Amino acid sequence: MSAEQALLTELGQRLRRAREEAGLSVSELARRAEVSRRTVTEAEAGRANLSILRLAALARVLRRPLGALCDLSLGILRGERIALIGLRGAGKSTVGPALALSLEVPFVELDRRIEELAGMTLGELFDLRGAATYRRLEREALERVLAEGQRQVIAVGGSIVEDEELFARLREASRTVWLRARPEEHLERVLAQGDLRPSAGRPRALEELRTILREREPRYALAELVIDTSGRTPAEVEAAVREGLDLDGRSSASPRVGRPDDS
């Protein structure tokens, strides 16, 4: 089901519930609101894209604030799409596939999609075409991924938070999770993967990482859920994400922090 259809379906369900609570038949609601019976029937079935004037007329008869009908949950738009954010070494490429497998949804690494669009690696992209081109391709890649469906797990580049508009788009369309770790762990994990770029010719690599994390932290903290990955296995982090987002249908105590001692 598309996001647009999900919105119309939810609106139809709200209209039907409000009509039944008001004790009105479809015909009576249509008569009082001065709309056709078919308009009400189609709207309740989620097949009518009502004008704001018709919706206002129905809300008036049902004695419901227009906002009560229109304030549809962002969860409908987000669907089951989960976006993992954080610095390199946070565990996105490890936790992401495991989470996607358990949810039986596709796993997408946005950086790989950007490389496909560019026809080169990210390193080559930055060296040959610059950060501005990277940002443009990042936007294009994200929109393509979002168009592929609502049931996904996406790992996005750590710098996406530096583009305020794009990060807002991601948060609007996804349930965002910041995988947080200490700077030392970020660096250790990247080096353990055989990627020596963070420290190659950069004796102050750890201090630079601390600075980047300190600058980005307020924006990372806008995520719906924050999970501290320090000292945790990938399986433990995945379980914390599932619990924090209530993916197993249990009520979560706090959607913002995945660990009692997080600060």
Image (cartoon, rainbow, N blue to C red):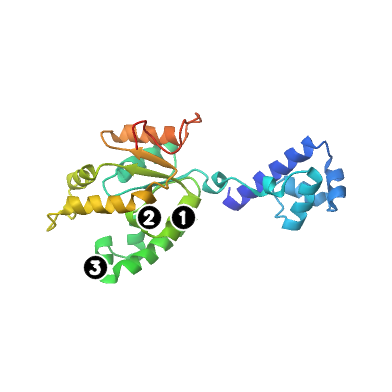
Which residue corresponds to mark 2? 161
Q: What amino acid type should be assigned to the residue bearing mark 1?
A: Ala
- Residue, x 36% and y 38% (percent of image)? 227
Image disc number at residue 168: 1
> How far across and how far down the image is residue 63, in percent?
78, 43
Front of the two marks 3 and 1: 1
Residue placed at 45% from the left, 60% from the top? 165
Q: Residues within 10 Å of mark 2 (few under 14, many from 20)?
A: many
Comes first in the chain, label 3 or label 2? 3
Relative depth, front residue between 67 and 166: 67
**Label ID, residue 127:** 3
CA distance for labels 3 and 2: 21 Å
Quarter of the figure with the C terminus: top left
Q: Secondary structure at mark 2?
A: helix
> Quick one: label 3, few (<14), some, or many (20+) residues within 10 Å?
few
Residue 84 % position (x, y): 38, 46
Question: Which secondary structure, mark 1?
Answer: helix
10 Å crowding of disc 1: few (<14), some (14-19), many (20+): some
Between the residue at mark 2 and the residue at mark 1, the CA separation in whole angstroms equals 9 Å
